[in-house]
Amino acid sequence: MSEAPSIDEAAGPGRLQAWFEACRSYSLTASVTPLLVGAAMAVRAGFFAPFRLLAALAGALAIHIGTNLINDYYDHVKGADSLDSLGGSKVIQRGLLTADEVWWGGMACLGAGSLAGLALSYACGWPILVIGLPSVAAGYFYTAPPFALAYNALGELAVFIFMGPAIVLGSYFVMALELGWAPLVASLPVGFLVTAILHANNVRDIETDPRYRKTTLANLFGRRAAAAEMALLCAAAYVTTAGAVVAGVLPWTVLATALTLPHAWAALRPVLSESTPAALDRAVLGSARLHLEFGLLLAGSILAAGALKL
């Protein structure tokens, strides 16, 4: 593993701040939001286990942070991240942490997430292993060889599965000790919108990713198809939510998520009309905001339905 060029430590933040930046705390809502949706579904069904839920939250955050760190390491090794990059924490490129430190930090976090999963598996049952082990593997191999999912046009699929249904079903199960179709359905719009964040990121980097042998759906099929995919991901979140209400799987209160439609357009518009990375970065930020607001409204409206006995 390579070392980052050293710089004058006094010129940058302290070690604790460097690790905080490396964790990319701003991205962690992508794990917290689906967990809240799963918990809300469990509470509405009459189940509540706060300590198991906190353990699940700790495990999900540890795996997410570990994934971020491993991603930073391999993007650095492959040259995909630089000081001019719009993505990543750039703690290695700025000399705040060495590449070795970031890799070992990532492994420590993935290990901590695995321990939380093992404890929950002991307390709750084998389904946690079925959900947790692939989640840890996907986190590591998202950018790590030999699979490097994000480099082989499988990033969107991995993110949809493991930051959508996997987390929603996992948080529901640790509360209810059973699985169900309703939480799976509730996970779909959350999965579509978290995938939209990654896809917007890939559209932003559509010109630069091929230089580093990074194949994404965006650069594989081109800008027009990428814009259509972004529109479909956003639309699918609202269509599946409305469909679940019509089918009687989710309460009518979840239609409150339609309040986020203006923000969906704000996230989509740059992908449809802009071409510069700086302008397209607004789509990444807008998608993250949309995912958080939609997810909070979804979880809140599910809890409201439970409180009102709807």
Image (spheres, grey):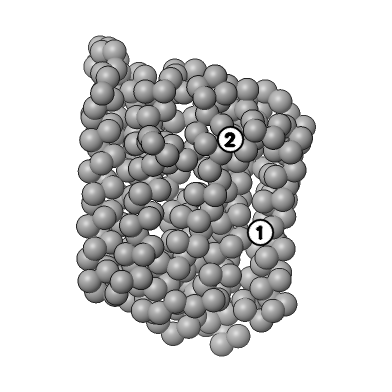
In percent of width and height, residue 64 lies at 38, 47
Q: Nearer the viewer, residue 247 or 1?
A: 1
Query: CA–CA distance between discs 2 and 1?
Result: 22 Å
Q: Position of residue 158 (x, y in %)?
A: 49, 49
Residue at the spot 22% in from the left edge and 43% down from the top edge = 108
Residue 25 placed where, x, y %? 39, 42
Does residue 226 appear left or right of residue 39 in this picture? right
* Residue 303 seen in the current view: no
Residue located at (50% from left, 56% from top): 161
Is residue 197 found left or right of 40 in the rendered image? right
Residue 275, quarter of picture: top right
Q: Is residue 157 left or right of residue 175?
A: right
Q: Which mark is residue 209?
A: none
Q: The disc labelled 2 sits on which kind of residue?
A: Thr
Q: Which residue position holds label 1?
A: 237
Identify the residue at horizontal 76%, vertical 35% (top origin): 224
Q: In the drawing, does residue 188 fall left or right of residue 95? A: right
Q: Secondary structure at mark 2?
A: loop
x and y percentages locating residue 141 in the rendered image: 39, 42
Does dot 1 land on a helix, a strand or a loop?
helix
Vertical placement of residue 18 versus 244, above or below: above
Q: Residue at x 45, y 61 (%)?
A: 166
Amino acid type, residue under disc 1 in the picture: Ala
Quadrant in which the N terminus appears: top left
Give the foreground label among 2 and 1.
2
Q: Are marks 2 and 1 in contact (CB under 8 Å)?
A: no
Label for residue 216? Answer: 2
Q: Is residue 110 visible?
A: yes
